[in-house]
Image (cartoon, rainbow, N blue to C red):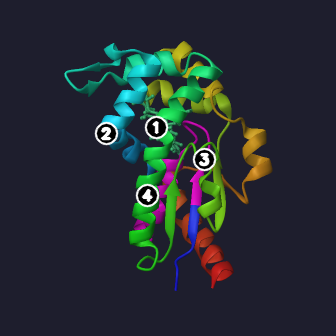
Amino acid sequence: MRSPVIGLTGPTGAGKSTWSAAFRALHCTVIDCDRLARRAVEQPQVRQALEQAFGAEIYRDGVLNRRLLATRAFADAQSVQKLNAATHPAIRAAILSELHAAERKSRAVIIDAPQLYEGGLETVCTTVAAVLAPEPLRLARILQRDKISREEAVRRMASQFGEAFFRSHADWILDGTLPPAEVPAHAERQLRIWLGECL
Ligand SMILES: CC(C)(COP(=O)(O)OP(=O)(O)OC[C@H]1O[C@@H](n2cnc3c(N)ncnc32)[C@H](O)[C@@H]1O)[C@@H](O)C(=O)NCCC(=O)NCCS
Ligand SMILES: Nc1ncnc2c1ncn2[C@@H]1O[C@H](COP(=O)(O)OP(=O)(O)OP(=O)(O)O)[C@@H](O)[C@H]1O
């Protein structure tokens, strides 16, 4: 039988990683799309598309300057679209390949994808959960985590869907403000609901 496939999404800094770590500890397979994206940008056809859209200087000795690409790609909506067009097909292929490998072997598969809807990945999910937290808290978290300027952080946040979108599209909302120590118990309860629904 196929395992349920849970899309785990939400805006930057909401706390998806805390929830996905809890699901991993519950023996779910977690497909981490940020990790797959890091691999995708090393593929020749993705590199070529990114260089064409954002300039050859974003790679140096074959290594992507992520900060420079981020500055250019999150500058406006059109640039974000170019970034997605260059990277999403390869990321999607990698996700589907990992999904195929995991689908019959895991208790559940969690696709941890900030760009789940932009990539059209909700169509392969049994259900979608969005992790949400208030914007000021998310901003503080990513300033701390990513060591970027406030301006860069605000631009990146503005390039994503807002809370209202996630509330109206996701099937479940998960609390990104819970103390981390409390997340595992909530994740276990949530997983039971999903497994019950999907049996
Ligand atoms: C532009 C890049 C090089 C910046 O790298 P950087 O190390 O600064 O950020 P990192 O990759 O760790 O992503 C951090 C967060 O930024 C946000 N983000 C990443 N890509 C995008 C995007 N295309 N649109 C909006 N937000 C994005 C996500 O919330 C992500 O979790 C990188 O984010 C990238 O390659 N993005 C395109 C691929 C993509 O869409 N990834 C999301 C996978 S679903
Ligand atoms: N429940 C929480 N309580 C306190 N801090 C948290 C919590 N969840 C996450 N954090 C911290 O906030 C930062 C951002 O969280 P996380 O990496 O999970 O974001 P994300 O939702 O995966 O966002 P992105 O899409 O940017 O990767 C991290 O440094 C993390 O340690």
Between label 4 and label 1, give the one nearer the viewer: 1
Ligand 2 under 8 Å from disc 3 Cβ: yes
Residue 68, quarter of the rendered image: top left
Residue appearing at x 52%, y 80% in the figure:
2
- Residue indicated by mark 1: 87
Ligand 1 under 8 Å from disc 4 Cβ: no
Earlier residue among tags 1 and 2 = 2
Earlier residue among tags 4 and 1 = 4
- Residue indicated by mark 4: 31
The kind of secondary structure element at disc 2 is loop
The kind of secondary structure element at disc 4 is strand
Ligand 1 under 8 Å from disc 2 Cβ: no
Earlier residue among tags 4 and 3 = 4
How would you rate the neighbour count of disc 2 (Cα within 10 Å): few for under 14, some for 14-19, many for 20 or more?
few
The relative height of residue 83 versus residue 198 in the rendered view (above or below) is above
On the image, the x and y values in percent for residue 80 come to: 57, 26
Span colored in magenta: 7-31
In 3D space, how far apart are the residues under numbered discs 4 and 3 (Cα atoms)? 19 Å
Q: Is residue 27 visible?
A: no
Instruction: Assess whether mark 1 and mark 4 are in contact (beta carbons under 8 angstroms).
Output: no
Between label 2 and label 3, give the one nearer the viewer: 2
Q: Point out the image quarter for the C terminus.
A: bottom right
On the image, the x and y values in percent for residue 189 come to: 61, 72
Earlier residue among tags 3 and 1 = 1
Earlier residue among tags 2 and 3 = 2
In 3D space, how far apart are the residues under numbered discs 2 and 4 (Cα atoms)? 19 Å
On the image, the x and y values in percent for residue 32 come to: 43, 52
